[in-house]
Image (tube, rainbow, N blue to C red):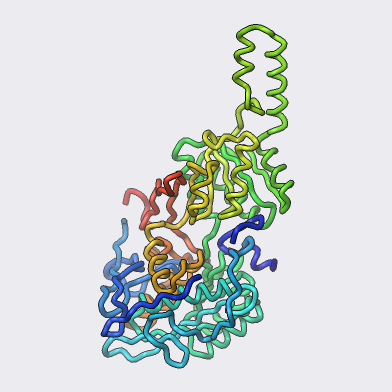
Amino acid sequence: MSAESECNSSMRRFRPGPACAAPHRRAASSCGVWAWPLIAVLCLLLAACSSSNVRERGEAAQGRAADAPRAQPVPPGEEQPRVPMATPPPYPVPAAPPPGLPGAEGGRVILTPPPGVNRTIGVGLLLPLSGADAGIGRALLDAAQLAVFDVANDELTLLPRDTQGTSQGASAAAISAIEGGAQILLGPLFAGSVVEVAPLARAANLPVVAFSNDRAAAREDAFVIGFRPEAAVRRVVGYAASQGRRRFAALLPEDAFGTRVAEAFREAVAAAGGAVADIEFYGQSQDSIAAAVRRLAAYEDRRAAMQARRAELAQAGDDLSARALRRLIGRDTLGALPFDAVLLAESGAALKALAPLLPFYDIDTGQVRVLGIDGRPGQELEREPSLSGAWFAGPSPDARKPFEERFRAVYGRPPHPLGVLAYDAASLAAVLATAEEGPAFNTISLTAPNGFAGAAGTFRLLRDGLVERQLAVIELRPTGAVVVSPARTTFQPLGN
């Protein structure tokens, strides 16, 4: 795996595990815009009198067009291995519009401007549309196109360019988009590509809103909006501490991602007033994983303590000792663990494979709360007994659900987990393009302190190029996932 793909995918897998249908067309209304009701509104969280002051990161979605009301300002106060996807057929660049949506001109997605407005606003979209990561690139392109038709009401032109999944390809794609009239660049996906593209965009005085989650790629004019593990760690550890958990442990992969999570974990526990009891790392092999869990469980010492206790009771020979000995049947270890919460950084099938090792080595997940950063725990995790009651931090399911339903209705398949990033970034560009004085693709607008409400929840872009997100905490139960701590919808301090 390349260095840039290792840390910059917003999702992780670990061991090999289990890995979309024909598009469904929707009829357009007679006025040429979608009759589908306004969904996934990307609100500008600005004061009512603000014009172009929009803040951090690219996850915004406004309203659609003629038959849908525009989003209103909201006043203050309120890379592990990637997900496997089938190899796609050669993808045309520029791409055709989503199935069932209004047509395109010259391969470009064109929006009809409101009356009296006659301008073209180019939005460059830099994605790996060929090569090993073409599946992800295609999925993100689909989501971005959907946002263009759902949100924009100006003559906005989406300019997809193929990065080929390489830094060199990203540079060529950026140059092509700039020469094609782009006024903002969305993408690329990987950190190394962002680093190559940023100076080209800066020379053209264009901002970059990239899909990486690597802070090393962030610049003042190059924002990385991927889901960063640090934010999820802070959120879930903080919530656990608020529920009385004080002694924390972590079980993490021995790689760059695990190092990032470990650093964030230590900081989050300290900020929450807790104590780090242990952090164990595992390698790629199953033996390494099992050994790490055994160390975390202090399995050998606790097993030896149990054997010694059994021998002591057996030697006593009295009725009381015999009853105590019978109570130990089925138990392998003796002694309490030094932690009451444990953080696991895996997701999906990898997490499902890892979690059962905890009770196998006598870490009682009924007593020790499992914490996770998989923001979209699916039904396969809900059915895993060792994860019952686990807490996960991630984007608000309520905010994300309309986007997922909309995407499935149009394309006939669920969106890629990273698709919401492209949807919100394209929506953000569409919102900023509506400024009366012209497209507000500038740092002041992009980093508006009140942020944006997008399909991945409320977020804002920071001056250092990072994104800040408001995350929810979700508890897994046999009957389904339940939000136990909703995501905030504002960045105003509590109590204001």
Which of the 4 image quarters holds residue 401?
Answer: bottom left
Q: Residue at x 49, y 69 (%)?
A: 419
Which of the 4 image quarters holds residue 103?
Answer: bottom left
Percent coordinates x, y for residue 13 in the rendering: 61, 57
Residue 297 in the figure: left or right of residue 184: right
Where the N terminus falls, by quadrant?
A: bottom right
Residue 418 in the figure: left or right of residue 257: left
Percent coordinates x, y for residue 64 in the rendering: 32, 76
Q: Residue at x 39, y 70 (%)?
A: 409
Task: Count all numbered tags in the image, as a single digit.
Answer: 0
Relative to the observer, which residue lies in front, 401 or 57?
A: 401
In the depicted structure, whether residue 96 falls above or below residue 60 = below
Residue 295 in the figure: left or right of residue 476: right
**Residue lying at the far front of the rendered structure:** 22
In the depicted structure, whether residue 422 falls above or below residue 260 = below
Which of the 4 image quarters holds residue 192?
Answer: bottom right
Q: Residue at x 64, y 53 (%)?
A: 258
Percent coordinates x, y for residue 137 in the rendering: 55, 74
**Residue lying at the far top of the rendered structure:** 318
Residue 198 visible? The answer is no
Relative to the observer, which residue lies in front, 295 or 122?
A: 295
In the depicted structure, whether residue 480 falls above or below residue 220 = above
Residue 175 visible? The answer is yes
Percent coordinates x, y for residue 108 in the rendering: 45, 88
Q: Residue at x 54, y 59 (%)?
A: 228
